[in-house]
Amino acid sequence: MTASFPRAEVVIDLDAVRHNVALLAGRAAGSAVMAVVKADAYGHGAVPVARAAVEAGATWLGTCSLGEALDLRRAGLSVRLFSWLDVPEVDFGPGILADIDLGVSSVDELRRIATAAQQVGRRARVHLKIDTGLSRNGCQPADWPELVAAAAASSDVDVVAVWSHLACADEPGHPSIDIQAKRFADAYDTARAAGLDPLRHLANSAAVLTRPDLHFDLVRPGIAMYGLNPVPQHEDLRPAMTFRAAVALTKRLPAGESVSYGHTWTAERDTTVALVPAGYADGVPRSLSGRMDVWLGGRRRAVVGRVCMDQVVVDCGDDTPAVGEEVVLFADGRAGEPTAREWADKLGTIDYEIVTSMYRPRVQRRYLGERP
Ligand SMILES: *Cc1c(COP(=O)(O)O)cnc(C)c1O
């Protein structure tokens, strides 16, 4: 191991992203793929991931905010871009000029976008969102005819699509899915009756994998692109993110000595411990203290004592790892390493939150499989 080995690093395998996007595109054959790269591509890095997704067949990119979409445009991504959740204060003008499609949830929002379109002298491309039951953004069914009529009558916007988002697609068979699908169909019919001919998009990763009847013209997978499986059934997805560090120091600890703040762990017999310079400031949740393993020297070993801000201590028994030896905190799990999913299960959350929170200033990010 070289002296330049970082304290801790997140490695993103872009070939895994390409594999996952190609798998999803195959499952949604007949539909275009919008790769969802919001929140810095769920912590994986928006620009490199977006490029890899496009290389693997995505023809759209989806972001939550206009700022994220503009960053992708400025980075040279020329595919269709869609941004769906902007605050009232946002200036839509630059987005319209950068050919970014905009989500619309209300007549008020439509007016603001139309005004911006007039100001920049270019029609805005909008996707009208119907709230089919998630009750977050989107237009309530009662207000939908008014929104559709206003959009159809506006000479400042082109209606590209009608869209919505599912609440429980990760629980296949959940009754809400069909209820949402029915409301979506009704909303589409209303738009058609108003003379519009929009695309339709509804499916997140879970629906791409389990509900081919809901793929429509365009699918919007996020989490599965990163190799994390949102549904109970097995899928051939490859987790793209590895979190690793290296042994900084080893020492022999006599029986009876305790480790880390609070002395929550005491060596029952003489043992060798390895210090790993990654702590909660680097993305190792302190609440995993006493219940996490790392992969070190070809096997799992327990982190003992509390997770600190900057370091953890690993019990190696009578093995003595080399200083600089690789320590995997989580990876794809193929060799038996811990995974982001395992952390999420222990923490009572979802793997989305684990990977999305891995952007830390002190943790380097490195890409495998980058193409020139
Ligand atoms: C985040 C998001 C997605 C992607 O969802 P996954 O479960 O990660 O596939 C799709 N559409 C919208 C509107 C989203 O906010």
Image (cartoon, grey):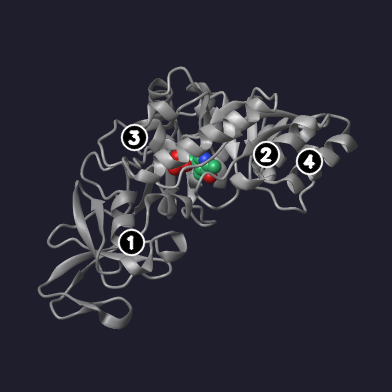
Kind of residue indicated by mark 3: Arg
Disc 4 is placed on an element classified as helix
Please tell me how crowded label 2 is: few (under 14), some (14-19), or many (20+) other residues with Cα within 10 Å.
Answer: some
Residue 311: image location, x then y, percent? 37, 66
Query: Does residue 328 show up?
Result: no
Kind of residue indicated by mark 2: Pro
Kind of residue indicated by mark 4: Ile
Query: Does residue 46 show up?
Result: yes
- Is disc 3 in contact with disc 1, using a CB cutoff of under 8 Å? no
Residue at the farthest top position: 30
List the residue tagged with mark 1.
Answer: 348
Marks 3 and 1, how far apart at CA: 22 Å
Kind of residue indicated by mark 1: Gly
246 relative to 370, above or below: below
- Is disc 3 in contact with disc 2, using a CB cutoff of under 8 Å? no
Q: What is the number of the mark on residue 113? A: 4
